Amino acid sequence: LSMPASTPIKTTCPYCGTGCGVEATPSGKLVRVAGDPQHPTNAGRLCVKGSALGDTVVPQGRLLHPQLRDKQSPGQPLQRLSWDAALDHAAGELRRIIDTHGPESVAWYVSGQLLTEDYYVANKLVKGFVGTANIDTNSRLCMSSAVAGHKRAFGEDIVPVAYEDLDRCDLVVLVGSNTAWCHPILFQRMLRAREARPQMKIVVLDPRKTASTEMADLHLGLRAGSDVRLFNGLLAHLHRLGLTDAAFVERSTLGLDETLAAADRDASLADIAADCGLEVEALERFYALFAATERVITCFSMGVNQSSAGTDKVNSIINCHLLTGRIGKPGAGPFSLTGQPNAMGGREVGGLANMLASHMDLEREEHRELVQRFWQSPAIASRTGLKAVDLFKAIESGEIKAVWIMATNPVVSLPDADQVRRALDQCELVIVSDVMAETDTTAYAHLLLPAQGWGEKDGTVTNSERCISRQRAFVPPLGEARPDWWMLSEVARRWGHAAQFPYRAVHEIFDEHARLSAFENEGARYFDIGGLAGLDAHAYDALAPLRWPVPRTAADARHLQAFADGRFYHADGLARFVPTPARAPANAVDADYPLVLNTGRVRDHWHTMTRTGLSATLSSHIPEPFVELNPADAEAAGIAHGSLARVSTRWGSLVGRAVVADEHARGSLFVPIHWNAQFASDARVGALVNPVVDPVSGEPEFKHTPAKVEAF
Ligand code: SF4
């Protein structure tokens, strides 16, 4: 890999949903990386992960050629084959299975690492041309509860806050988010805003003490899973204080009375504090701060979403903003911080098994009819597909006989991850398109397709605040790596759909996506990038970051703050309060498994480390998997700080280095999500996580699995 020195290419960081702009300069065998000073998200700043991106543009471990495993001769090495033969095999085998068993017998499992154009083509092919909605994404594990909460409250999946609102607010509430480590550039922006305006406060609600809680004005270490109780209590408290925005509630909402009734409105603050495991003074202080502050933004992330009550948690937060009318105004609103670089872009094109492109609804006949007409497709999925956890159960049961996994590593990342191994082990056809040759998941592939990686591929991503930003190629692809959209289109052509998949370049896909967003959409949907339709290759290449909805004409004012006019996207234009009776996590601790296992990220790694594991700098921060626990729990188990400890649940076990810390809450364990068989044996925490999901969103409960710990 040797490249000529050149001028910087502007692109976007492929890690977190903050979506920072990057300038990449290839030089010889190296790539120099710096923050893009002109990008509105980060104005030249990068966190440690973004700064080390150059270390990851290397040939080590790359999948370079299509390869096929002979299923009749297990144990034989993969055989290299041409792209033509590989695509013939994929198209032929998928067609055979569909013709024999029907469209519901095949599935796709895709990723928030895909670019929007890849995501668009995948969803078009599967929902419009296979005729099934069995396409789900690892974003199901990340923000599907936020999507479901938005749709219940607003009628559409809309994030009503932008980053600049953080510069204008007087209170930021971070719920279930270690923003300092997981969205570092965004957290630094919050700290700068507080420095500039000392009246601004930061409150963190998190069972753990983290780098974020260290910087907070107030930390509430609430009991895991008690968020709904806390926000229901806040709703009733604000109502009692007379802080209901009666005019807004009357004009713009429905359902307050039922919601207050379900919120246990007469509970005392002492009862709520006890249920949440808090001192009553701390709860009172938070409630008073929220009550007294007009400009408040409640940011929430995985601690809220990854729960069997995730959607209710989201709605319990939104309810408080609706009650006080603190939404649709500068510096106020609920704000979902997405985990992945393109979770939002995936949502725009219907990346989840229960969505259609352009924020249309798979369950609404008029939306299905509209999308099918636009695509000129022979069929359209008529029912919701299987969500991630159920999808892999259906593979294990044999209901699904073929799966195409794109840009993700479910053998590590899904809950009850050993079940995923069992499922793939007996699946009739497993196609994996990936950048890396050897992951826990590629080991189960029958057909391996080499995908282009960051720096090679070209397209767009959308960050947490709805800002669309270009990822640009700046190095030639290694080996025979090709774009994901190209592989999918080639399969479509082999099925006779060349006219509907005519793409020769990525800007043509973006144009189609933009046109669909405006197709028969006169304000019926908030998502609209019709103003970007018709970009030619040059204009697309030059596209500067911008937030949707994009005005279609100069006079079009739809780019103003979401909901500023008090109108929402339910058919009647009203937002919904959603009753959220508090309920406990699905599995309670017991005598055999007395501790609560919580999982999450560390500062310097990303997902299953296939990229960040290539950087010596990043690996030096925390070099090995660990188990964080309280001294009392460690002593009870005979575990010393720095020794090895085994964590077990009813689903699996792992071994990690014990980190015994006074500040860690008693009765709980924390294990990071990143390490796996590639980097440390026996350390896939996914194998320990209970496979229970939120009944509305299908998002798994990664933050609450009954567990035990013992010396190893
Ligand atoms: Fe990349 Fe997120 Fe860091 Fe920005 S904050 S540089 S997007 S990892």
Image: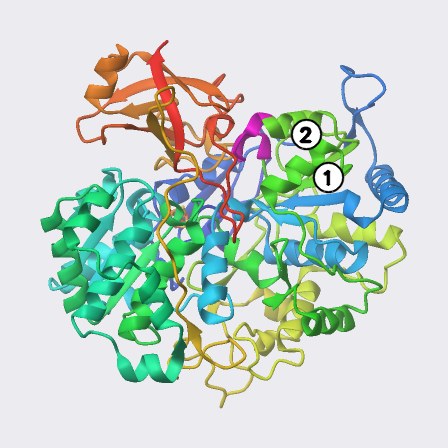
Lateral position of residue 50 relative to residue 488, left or right: left
Is the residue marked by circle 1 packed among few (<14), some (14-19), or many (20+) residues within 10 Å? many
Is 416 magenta? The answer is yes
Secondary structure of residue under mark 2: helix
Q: In the depicted view, which residue is nearer to us: 563 or 705? A: 705
Q: Tell me if label 2 and label 1 are in contact, CB under 8 Å.
A: no
Whether 27 is among the magenta residues is no
- State which quarter of the image contains the C terminus: top left
**First in residue order: circle 2 vs circle 1:** 1
- Magenta segment range? 410-418
Given the image, on which type of amino acid does mark 2 rest? Answer: Ala
In which quadrant of the rendered view does residue 278 lie? top left
- In the image, 627: left or right of 294? right
Q: Which colour scheme is used?
A: rainbow
Q: Nearer the viewer, residue 75 or 83?
A: 75
Give the quadrant of residue 1. top right
Q: Is residue 189 visible?
A: no
Percent position of residue 187, x then y: 28, 52
Q: Residue at left 80%, top 54%?
A: 130
Residue visible at 26% across and 64% down?
235
User: Which residue is under mark 2?
Assistant: 423
Residue 647 image offset from top left, x and y in percent: 39, 19
**Mark 1 close to ligand 1, CB under 8 Å:** no
